[in-house]
Amino acid sequence: MIASGLGLGADAAAGAAAYGRSVAAAIRTEALAKYFGDVAALRPLDLEVGEGEVLGYLGPNGAGKTTTIRCLLGLIRASAGRAEIFGVDAQARPAEAHRRLAFVPGEANLWPGLTGGETLHLLGRIQGRIDGDYQAELIERFKLDPSKRVRAYSKGNRQKVLLIAALSSRADLLILDEPTTGLDPLMEQAFRDSVGEARRRGQAVFLSSHILSEVEALSDRVAILRAGELIEVGTLAQMRHLSALSVDATFDTTPPDLSRIPGVTAVEVEDKHVRCRVIGSVEPLLGVLAASGVHQLLSREPSLEELFLAHYGREPETRPPAVR
Ligand SMILES: Nc1ncnc2c1ncn2[C@@H]1O[C@H](COP(=O)(O)OP(=O)(O)OP(=O)(O)O)[C@@H](O)[C@H]1O
Ligand SMILES: [Mg+2]
């Protein structure tokens, strides 16, 4: 019995090494959905995070970010669909799914009587592996005093303990739910450096965040969630391509009429100065500007904040969920 059990384990491990581990996405969801009564916290979601990819997961309060994460961790039962972590069904086999991930929740609930150092030791035991040298480096970088008791830590310091524990596990996948809440700007930079290091080491990161500059700086792709629904996913470059470019032009004389040029909207004229937005090709606009004695030209891609606001400017959907 024991021998055959070991044999199966070895075969499974060899199979994973040969196939699963090299091809399975870090995260894959298929029509993953969660309803709390009538509330569609997460509408059927299809999402993939590749190995070594940093995905920024954005959405306003109540959009369903934490619900997604709790489904991915097997902490709540999904109403429908499937969630996989490196090919393992996270809902049916959460213990196995957790082997290659580390998680940082938005709220740090820790043992108040333990010191920071004891807490890191305990979290490391739970996680199963820890890179001690890297942990020491992180304690230094995040300026954490590990000799203090958790009850004496500020909110930001409690958050640092969880971040250091997750980062020093060197897990193949980091799932972070608004991890920088409570961190000051210096520590926010330490966090960014650490995620950059994780990415360079080939770790995947699922980063739920409200902080647009953080997502912009760290993510390979961005997913935008609204009222439980994924409304956009792609690289920032792809998203910007779909959005308007802002153009400011100053002329030597009265500006030409730009309002009839294809793709040009929101034209505002002020003396010799014109401001407008352009979607799609800028060539027609540039042709007119060049022929009209433009004196100074400034163009700017939309920031993630502008993209985000453009998405949330619309009314959220109120239709009832299709799946229960
Ligand atoms: N246990 C629960 N029971 C009932 N409704 C819930 C429960 N958990 C979450 N919800 C609802 O599901 C929706 C999504 O909540 P969720 O916590 O996933 O949002 P979030 O994007 O993480 O928001 P925040 O940015 O505030 O953390 C909200 O409408 C919330 O009220
Ligand atoms: Mg949340």
Image: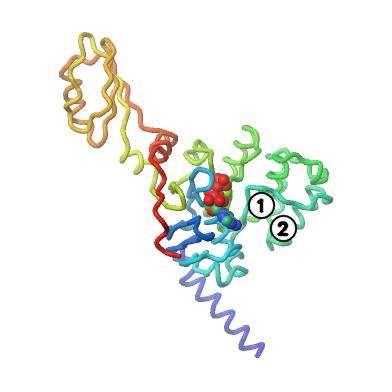
Q: Earlier in the sequence, mark 2 or mark 1?
A: 2
Q: Residue at x 26, y 11 (%)?
A: 272
Residue 208 seen in this snapshot: no
Which element carries disc 1, helix, strand or loop?
Answer: helix
Does 177 appear above or below 75? above
Q: Residue at x 21, y 8 (%)?
A: 253
Residue 311, quarter of picture: top left
Does 32 appear above or below 13? above
Foreground of the two, 61 or 213: 61
Residue 7, quarter of picture: bottom right
Residue 206 pos. (x, y %): 52, 52
Foreground of the two, 120 or 157: 157
Q: Amino acid at mark 1?
A: Ser
Which element carries disc 2, helix, strand or loop?
Answer: helix
Residue 216 pos. (x, y %): 47, 39
Residue 165 pos. (x, y %): 69, 52
Quadrant for the N terminus, please. bottom right
Q: Label 2: how many residues lie within 10 Å, few (<14), some (14-19) or many (20+)?
A: some
Mark 2–mark 1 Cα distance, whole angstroms, equals 8 Å
Foreground of the two, 272 or 62: 62
Q: Badge 1 is on which residue?
A: 168
Asked whether, in this view, residue 99 is left or right of residue 28, the answer is: right
Q: Label 1: how many residues lie within 10 Å, few (<14), some (14-19) or many (20+)?
A: many
Q: Badge 2 is on which residue?
A: 124
Ligand 2 closer than 8 Å to the CB at disc 1? no
Does 295 appear above or below 162? above
- State the mark number for residue 298: none
Residue 22 seen in this snapshot: yes
Foreground of the two, 85 or 258: 258
User: Mark 2 touching mark 1, by CB under 8 A?
Assistant: yes
